[in-house]
Image (spheres, grey):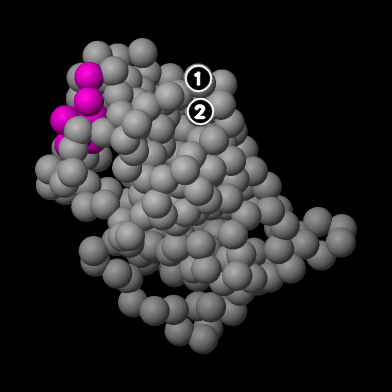
């Protein structure tokens, strides 16, 4: 199964922890790819994803890591407040997620498929600037939010969607759009192929937003 996206997020978090020389004693690690982060830090692998819609059990934590999750939360401001409350004084939040600007080729293909009546098929995403403002609003301090781009190349839209599903990056919209019919799917595949380069592969872009924030 494809794991390059979630492993990239995990590597980013571990690199930041190494730079910060974190030495806390308690940690909550959640999200796909969290097992590798937990193993590297000497903590048990996460049992299940955290429900950020309610107060977080087991608090307080010296460190909370979230991988590939916060972009799928319905109430992100509320989730950040729960995360801050779950940290011990001096605690650290590290989170990575796909951000605004991701999947432009897939979005273009879905618009071509739906024609004059486009449907919501990809959940909203947040950019670095908005994430920083939300962290400040939630009461975090010393927040640093940045992003970097990843590019993956695909021979077909089917391969791209397969990669996304294998890594838990499918749409989580509560109101799912109707499945594409055959004609619509062919339009999507054609639009994706029209963006191909000389070797027949299409470059898809992913913007990874990484959050570092502290609770005083």
- Estimate the x, y position of residue 46 in percent, counting from the top left: 36, 55
The residue shown at (34%, 38%) is 27
Magenta portion: prevailing SS class: helix
Label for residue 17?
2
- Range of magenta residues: 81-89
In the depicted view, which residue is nearer to us: 182 or 161? 161
The residue shown at (51%, 21%) is 21
Query: For the residues marked 1 and 2, what is the alpha-carbon distance in whole angstroms?
Result: 5 Å
- Estimate the x, y position of residue 108 in percent, counting from the top left: 54, 57
Q: Residue furthest bottom?
A: 182
Position above or below: 62 against 115: above
Quickly name the residue at label 1: 20
Viewed as shown, does residue 119 lie left or right of 35? Answer: left
Viewed as shown, does residue 172 lie left or right of 190? Answer: left
Question: How many numbered discs sit on the rendered protein?
Answer: 2
SS for tag 2?
helix
Within 10 Å of the Cα at label 1, are there few (<14), some (14-19), or many (20+) other Cα atoms? few
> Are dots 1 and 2 in contact, CB under 8 Å?
yes
The residue shown at (23%, 64%) is 174
């Amino acid at each position: 199964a494809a794991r390059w996206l979630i492993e990239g997020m995990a590597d980013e978090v571990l690199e930041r922890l190494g730079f910060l020389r974190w030495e806390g004693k308690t940690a909550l690690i959640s999200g796909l790819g969290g097992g590798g982060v937990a193993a590297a830090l000497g903590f048990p692998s996460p049992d299940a994803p955290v429900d950020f819609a309610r107060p977080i059990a087991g608090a307080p934590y010296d460190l909370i890591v979230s991988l590939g999750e916060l972009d799928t939360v319905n109430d992100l401001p509320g989730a950040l407040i729960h995360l801050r409350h779950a940290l011990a004084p001096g605690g650290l939040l590290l989170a990575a997620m796909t951000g605004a600007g991701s999947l432009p080729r897939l979005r273009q293909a879905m618009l071509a498929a739906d024609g004059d009546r486009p449907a919501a098929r990809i959940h909203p995403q947040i950019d670095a600037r908005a994430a920083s403002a939300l962290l400040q609003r939630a009461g975090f301090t010393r927040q640093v939010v940045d992003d970097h781009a990843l590019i993956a190349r695909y021979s077909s839209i089917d391969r791209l969607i397969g990669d996304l599903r294998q890594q838990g990056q499918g749409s989580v919209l509560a109101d799912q759009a109707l499945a594409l019919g055959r004609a619509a799917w062919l339009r999507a595949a054609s639009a994706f192929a029209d963006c191909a380069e000389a070797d027949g592969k299409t470059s898809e872009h992913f913007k990874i937003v990484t959050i570092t924030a502290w609770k005083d």
